[in-house]
Image: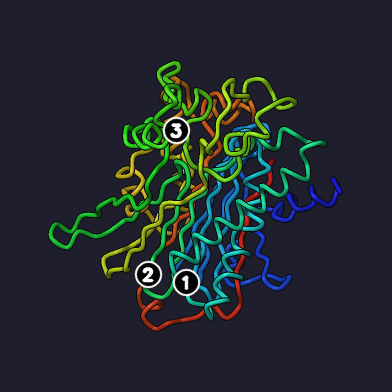
Amino acid sequence: MLEASMNLLSHCWKPFGVDTVGGGGGEGSEHGGGKDGLLWFRDAGRCATGELSMAVVQANQVLEDQSQIECGSLGTFVGVYDGHGGPETARFVCDHLFRHFQAIAAETNGVVTAETIKRAFRATEEGFNDLVAKLWSAKPQIATVGTCCLVGVIYQHTLFVANLGDSRAVLGRKNCDTGSIDAVQLSNEHNANFEAVRKELREMHPDDQQIVVLKHGIWRVKGIIQVSRAIGDVYMKNAQYNREPIAAKFRLTEPYQMPIMTANPSIISHRLQPNDLFLIFASDGLWEHLSNETAVEIVHSHPHAGSARRLVKAALHEAARKREMRYSDLQKIDKKVRRHFHDDITVIVLFINHDLINRGVVQERPLSIRSALEH
């Protein structure tokens, strides 16, 4: 039973940049991926909604970020999963969320709505809860692992962005009045360092004076975790897992009745406009070092190919600068130790081709790209 359950976690452990298109290469596979130390990249590719670029750099001992691009009859699906406490939940989501999305959309003859995405999140959360229940006696620490989830779906002329946690989606849009490029954040973040998030938590838990705690200058939910919404972190949602044998640093001393964290995504829908140029989807590791405006300017002022890798390198240069060291010296630092300088970073850039979208071009051969497991 344990082996079968753990196999569920391994399905998306595919080499970065390898397309899975009916078992063979797919459209865009001529722009293969590459690696540079702990950095993986897919500089360029094409799908029915435009061009794409993808990159990820590892900092943790085991890569906790996972990501995917899926293009087919349901449009273009982008997922960025920023794991915490371990890689298991992000890997599980990478393997299951899009499958649920496909199955639920099929129930409505392939029509995609915000409810389609919300139901896919719910089914994925329930599936991971079931896995925790199966593994509790053999691997109890899986109850303490979670992941932020950022999903973008371009379906016909509509962009949907769903988010749990503090990954971020930013739109690069041409300002028709000035000709400049504006950076428009499309995702709501759920990090306790935002006053609005702390207010929401206090309103949901009026009798809990310790629902958010300031520790070392950082606000954390119950003094443990920064994000208030995620898939996983089951010990924060079901009190039966808030006990030994999970590590003492996770166990809450006071019992609770209602879940402390949730997996309810914030979802926005946006009708694509002709001046919408590109989208940046990235884990918090990027935004820790680059502002929305800086990231958009970097993408806009360079060729499309290599955009994601360029953003990752810009963040690494900034991480090195903050520690008063050279980028070349940062590159020599191995994973695990590297985490003291920056987090795992995942970036996906989509360039919007309005002509293809207006013509209703359908991806005839589905394209699937998954991120690397680790170095």
Question: Judging from the image, what secondary structure is the residue with disc 3 in?
Answer: helix
In the rendered image of this protein, does residue 375 appear above or below residue 30? above
| Residue 314 sits in quarter | top left
Query: Is mark 1 in CB contact (under 8 Å) with mark 2?
Result: yes
Q: Please report whichever mark, 1 or 2, sits nearer to the chain's N-terminal start.
A: 1
Farthest residue in the bottom direction?
Answer: 359
- Residue 65, x across and y down, in percent: 59, 43
In the rendered image, the quadrant that contains the C terminus is top right
Q: How far is mark 3 from mark 1, CA to CA? A: 39 Å
Q: Is residue 33 visible?
A: no
Q: Residue at x 36, y 58 (%)?
A: 268
Crowd band around label 2 with a 10 angstrom C-alpha radius: few (<14), some (14–19), many (20+): some
Query: Is mark 2 in CB contact (under 8 Å) with mark 3?
Result: no
Residue annotated with mark 3:
317
Looking at the rendered image, the disc whose residue lies closer to the viewer, 3 or 1, is 1
Looking at the rendered image, the disc whose residue lies closer to the viewer, 2 or 3, is 2
In the rendered image of this protein, does residue 306 appear above or below residue 137? below
Q: Is residue 273 visible?
A: yes
